[in-house]
Amino acid sequence: MASGIAILRSGLPDGLMESQGHRLHVRGEGVEAEWRFAFRESRPLLPVWHEGVLRLVQWGNRDRRSHLPPTGWTWLATVRAGGWGPFGAELVDIPCNFAYEKGVWFRVRQGMRGILVPGPNGPCVYVICEPSTRYYRVMTRSERMPVLIDEVI
Amino acid sequence: MRIGHLDADCFYVSAERVRDPWLNRRPVGVLGNNGACVIAKSYEMKALGVRTGEPIWDAVRTCPDGIYVKRDFAWYEVLSRKILDIVRDESPVAEYYSIDEFFFQPGHGCRAESIRDRILEETGLPVTVAIARTRTLSKLFAETVKPFGAIEVTDPKHEEEILSKLPVTEVAGIAGRRAAKLHPYGVRTCLDFVRMPRSVVKSLLTVVGEQLWWELQGRNVLALQTQKPPTQAVSRGGGFTATSDPTVVFAWAVRHLERLIEEFDFHQVRAGKLTLWLEYRDAATGLGEARLDSPSDRFDLLLEATREALRQAWKPGWGARKMDLIASNLHGPGPIQRTLFESPDPRQDALTVLKRGINAEVGRFALRSGATLPLAELYRDPASGYEICDVKGKICF
């Protein structure tokens, strides 16, 4: 899976980020700074494209009292089987330039697929996963990989 | 005569940056076939201490902010051929040495700087170009101005000045054992080597060393090869996760065989002998050979030969991790002498045509031997279907 993502500063409007207390990270001299989002943060967020609007929403659910699964990821097979139908889920794109898993940052060309679900405290997004390809598993030592937009690692 | 050498700067990384410019100036590593090792790195990643060939789990400790990218040889070939087109446009004589290295005879008015700038403008790739009196000198001088350098050295005095500063091991072809042979003679720099008597060079390094010596004197003895010379042997192989399961190892052998047969089609040859080389976990090796009754490109006959070679190379329970399958005794498309006991097999011939046709139409390996089923996961990854050795026409691997 991917436990974090990064998107170039120019990929998100500054106004969207101002209220979130996020810090910009710089990966090398003279390069454009990046916004980073990690599931381990106390209030994890992800950018999503929804109905033509780029917005920040809560990443998954950590409230065990909620009716939503207490995780930040879901299987592609579950989505295909209609498991999220009763929750009113919608498919969304999660834009990013890089993603992170078990210490490894890897390039993402467009972004990842997710589902947006209405929750008690506003919508939340789950990253869609599938079993890792051999390549991804060797690279990250993870058995799950994110479903990327028009790309397989 | 002048010879030019053009070398793309950290080519795989630069190729990725052409399509994803946000990777520019960031530490980037390109991973190899299995996703386990860094096969190319940006200058930024190199500066942080990551080495080529380093496993990713070590590289992420050295460079935690590095960005790792899956290799894409099909894309690298597109850019490599763009460079080749430009080089051929600039020069009547061009050698496609490797995916990222080219030699050429500069045409009238062709300058190192102008060809470098043209390639950057038309492909987006930074390259280094050197022009000198011989190919060995141009390759050597290119290394002194990387990255994105351009240099022209044809004056012997200027050559000497540079050669005096370069260790002899910088010469392509002089490393390790050859350098050790030169060491007792006080040869440290390229200029020391140039000043050795030719007879001593020949006695120490044979004709190969002598050729380099002539080249460094400014005399052309290594001609540019505009066409790949006829193939003497073809091989396919590579590393894999160590296994002692004979079914998996046989699957790898069959995969390599099917790739070899594609090469036979390309080169229009048939093989008379197959050699299978296996490396095991503790670096032990096994070797097997099988000769065919007469040269063939038929899958069923070569499969039996592969099985026999593997049987000889196999050490039960040892854990194989690397394999090479080498076809030799190659014969061209002309008539061959068959043995008295061979009979034509039109059914197998028809199957070969059918398999080739389906794979050409639907995709490489769409129809393949069932023996490769243990590697189904590998075949699911389209990037595994195209490797560096599949880029045709290069002189060097």
Image (cartoon, helix red, strand yellow):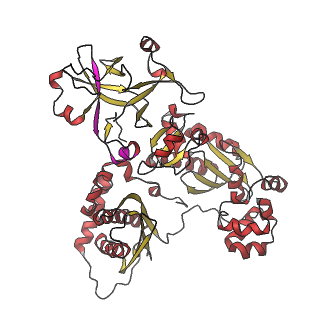
Q: Residue at x 56, y 38 (%)?
A: B124
- Of residues A139 and B39, which is closer to you in this image? A139
- Of residues B171 and B332, which is closer to you in this image? B171
Residue most extreme to the bottom = B340
In this image, B229 relative to B270: left or right?
right
- x and y, in percent, of residue B390 in the image: 44, 57
- Tell me if I can see residue B7 in this picture: yes
- x and y, in percent, of residue B80 in the image: 53, 48
- Of residues A119 and B87, which is closer to you in this image? A119
State whether residue B19 is above or below residue B176. Answer: above
- x and y, in percent, of residue A120 in the image: 23, 14
Asked which quadrant contains residue B26, the reply is: top right
Asked which quadrant contains residue A28, the reply is: top right
Q: Residue at x 38, y 73 (%)?
A: B313
Asked which quadrant contains residue B111, the reply is: top right
Is A38 a magenta residue? no
- x and y, in percent, of residue B393 in the image: 50, 59
Q: Residue at x 38, y 84 (%)?
A: B337
In this image, B93 relative to B160: left or right?
left
Range of magenta residues: A119-138
State whether residue B27 is above or below residue A92. Answer: below
- The number of discs equals 0
Is A123 a magenta residue? yes
In the rendered image, which quarter contains the N terminus of chain A? top left
In this image, B331 relative to B353: left or right?
right
In the rendered image, which quarter contains the C terminus of chain A? top left
